[in-house]
Amino acid sequence: MSAATAPATASVTGVRETAAVFGDAVPLVGTIARGPTAGNTGVVLLNAGLVQRAGPGGLHVRLAARLARRGFPTARVDLSGVGDSPVRRDRTPLDEARVLEVRSILDGFEEAGPERFVLCGICTGADNAFRAALEEPRVCGLILLDGYPYRTRGWWLRHQWTRIRRAGPGAIVRRLARRGPAGAIDEPAWDGVSRTIPPRDIAAGQLRALVDRGTHIYAIYTGGFRDWYNHRGQFRAAFPDVDFADRLTVDYLPAADHVFRAASSQKDLAMRLLEWLEARWGTA
Amino acid sequence: MTLSFAGPAGSTVSPTRLTDGQLAAIRHLPAAPSRAALVICPPAFHEYQLCQRTLRVLAERLAAAGIASSRVDVRGVGDSVYGPEPVTVAAWAGDALAAAADLRAASGVERVHLLGLRAGAIVAFEAARRLPGALAVLWSLPRSGADHVRALEAVQRDWFAAYAAQHGPDTDPDAAAGSIAGHPAPPELLESLRAWGAAENAAAGVEAIRFETGDSGSDREPEGAVTVPGPAPWRVTIDVAAPPVPAAALERIVATLAERLT
């Protein structure tokens, strides 16, 4: 059995929330939200780093209710070692384990109704979603919130301008004396310790494979990530060699922080996601 | 169809939803018949996120000691949702009592006690008042609800200052409205918390076991409380490699409860 779910119950909010346990190798604890009507596209919210399935500030709980109410059954699930799910003991490398775990979530979620899936994650959640989508043809859409960052010449110019404005007029001369990059910066921008970012050329090939397969991608970057991404056009500029056709949507939300702490940012995010989802897989 | 899976020491872990799906709860039942039962009430707002792992490990260790427990997320906290009705401390206590009824049925233990950490201790205290025979196990109970809300609001001010410094002209001036560090904070809930006073409730006839974390910075007089070692779980910074759990504190708490609870 790949998943077990509690009997469905009516809900005071118009959305039914049921407990679920996914997976065979390791039990993954989750919650499925369903609205009065449910289409055949399910959304899976993956952990943002080590934050429990409720999401940063409970973002996933509220997002799931909003999506479910509009016909998108939504599962929020703790991957192994996060939140309520136990640690995996089989020594599978982490990136590989995450792909296996997402697959087991889709297997279980499929039993509950949906036939195709949109994966959504913040930061490492976006990375896990991206890697799983490459291996899993049932994934029709990806929502990548502060996903892989690739700096470009446009990023560098805006970044320097911001620093100059903050430093004051006296810094301008010193800045001008420095050389900018000769062309697009094609190496991963990330220098942190908790993310594995592929080289740009590898990512370009992976994006091509996803787009050729028909996967829709919604990349959203926040102002909290501005040291790596700072304008709407940066994603396309980083991948001039990928023909996204109509399958890529990009937004840059400068007022939002990395985990959407402000209520206004959360509402804005939910509205954008709903609009994007309904335009592609809406039930109306 | 069962939702259970095997936990440590032969225990059984069962995620569930209560009160028409609104509340998330996770039961931890020992391998052998339970000798006692305890509902665990977590802190609220950002402290929930910081303490979740600590309370999960506590539940696992309690199960190993023969004590059944249910970790309940009261409405609007953790994986539970707010409903249309106003959220107050009394409503939170009602949620804890719903978890107590569920745990009683699942464990077969008639007398269910309540444990809470920080805001959860307020909930545990209020629920114990309404549950005859229940002990309230209070871990770092705030001196008063007003004190607790002031501390939460200070966290919110610090967050907004850091956010504004990073976002500069892109700062949303309303970003801090109606929340504590990103968690919705309904006015009626904050008002209800502010109005809660431990001193007035001291004579409420609730039998309590109190634990205070040694390095919590609290100016509470630890008289009558068992001091447990830090770190204070609601103050830790999440470490990507190893989220800290105050293991020595949990050992002390479990040993005390194994001796006191029936």
Image: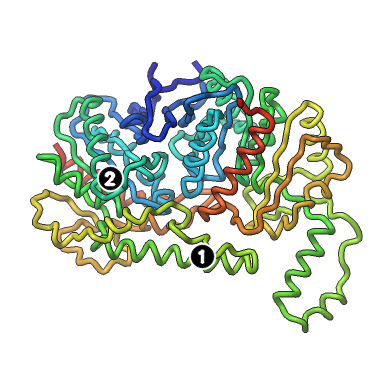
Left or right: B129 in relation to B87: left
Q: What element carries label 2?
A: helix
Q: What residue type is labelled 2?
A: Trp
**In the image, what residue occupies the spot 64% across and 36% down?**
A129
Nearest to the observer: residue B151 or residue A89:
B151
Which quadrant of the figure has residue B40?
top left
Q: Is residue B74 left or right of residue A107?
A: left
x and y percentages locating residue A42 in the rendered image: 58, 27
- Residue situated furthest right in the rendering: A182
Q: Mark 2 points at which residue?
A: B92
Residue A213 screen position, x and y as percent: 78, 26
Residue A97 seen in the figure = yes
Q: Which class describes the residues within 10 Å of circle 1: few (<14), some (14-19), or many (20+)?
A: many
Q: Left or right: A150 with respect to B141?
A: right
In this view, B50 is above or below A163: above
Question: Label 1, on which residue?
Answer: B160
Q: Is residue A88 visible?
A: no
Q: What element carries label 1?
A: helix
Chain holding disc 1: B
Q: In which quarter of the image is the N terminus of chain B?
A: top left
Residue at the spot x=45%, y=26% of the render?
A20
A176 or A251, nearer to the observer: A251
**A117 and B169: which one is in front?**
B169
Rendered residue at 43%/52% (across/down): B184
Query: Dot 2: few (<14), some (14–19), or many (≥20) neighbours within 10 Å?
Result: many
